[in-house]
Image: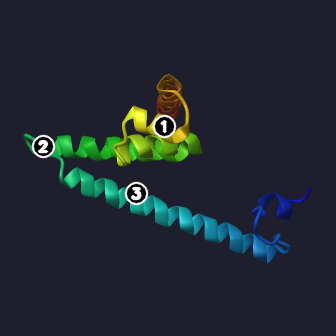
Amino acid sequence: MNLFELVSQPNQPPISSPKGLIHHIVKCVAVDAVRREKRRKAMEEKLKHLPLQNPDPAEIYLLKENMEIYLRARAAADPMCRELWDMLFTERSTYREIAEKLRISEGTLRVRLLRCKDKAMEWIRKNT
């Protein structure tokens, strides 16, 4: 199997030239950058509305730094963990709702979330 076959998407025509491969890579990198920027802006917007009791610049800096660490850890996590975190934190779904949607028990969901958290903490320890 050659490189062009490895990067081709299952429902897309195969990439047959180096120019096509470069175009595909550039497109994917651009899409990732746009998504990353969109997430960063959304998180900054959420930080603006946090009810800070004392808007200390150091506290705001720490919140932004922690948000950056979270976004990098999220990007490094596997797709299942990102999906679970999105349902839990972004959609504000309960454990029961997520478990029903995924057709698993709440206990299984809690174990998966714990493993995702452990993997994220391990990544943070290694990369920060």
Residue 103 image position (x, y, % from top left): 55, 36
Question: Mark 1 or 3, which is nearer the eye?
Answer: 1
Q: Quick one: 58 or 18, which is closer to the camera?
A: 18
Q: CA distance from mark 1 to mark 3?
A: 27 Å
Mark 1 and mark 3 lie on one chain; the one further toward the N terminus is: 3
Name the foreground residue: 70 vs 86.
86
Q: Which residue is mark 3?
A: 39
Measured as percent of width and height from the top left, residue 29 is found at 59, 64
- Colour mode of the rendering: rainbow
Q: Which of the image's four quarters has the C terminus? A: top left
Please tell me how crowded label 2 is: few (under 14), some (14-19), or many (20+) other residues with Cα within 10 Å: few
Q: Report the residue at 29% width, 47% height from top.
A: 64
Identify the residue under disc 1.
100
**Residue 31 in picture, x, y percent from top left:** 55, 67
Q: Is residue 57 above or below residue 110?
A: below
Q: Residue at x 10, y 45 (%)?
A: 55
- On the image, numbered disc 2 is attached to which residue? 52
Q: Residues within 10 Å of mark 1 (few under 14, many from 20)?
A: few
Secondary structure at numbered mark 3: helix
Residue 51, quarter of the rendered image = top left
Give the number of the mark in front: 2 or 1.
1
Tag 1: residue type? Glu
Amino acid at the residue labelled 3: Arg
Calculate the distance from the C-alpha at mark 2 to the C-alpha at mark 3: 22 Å
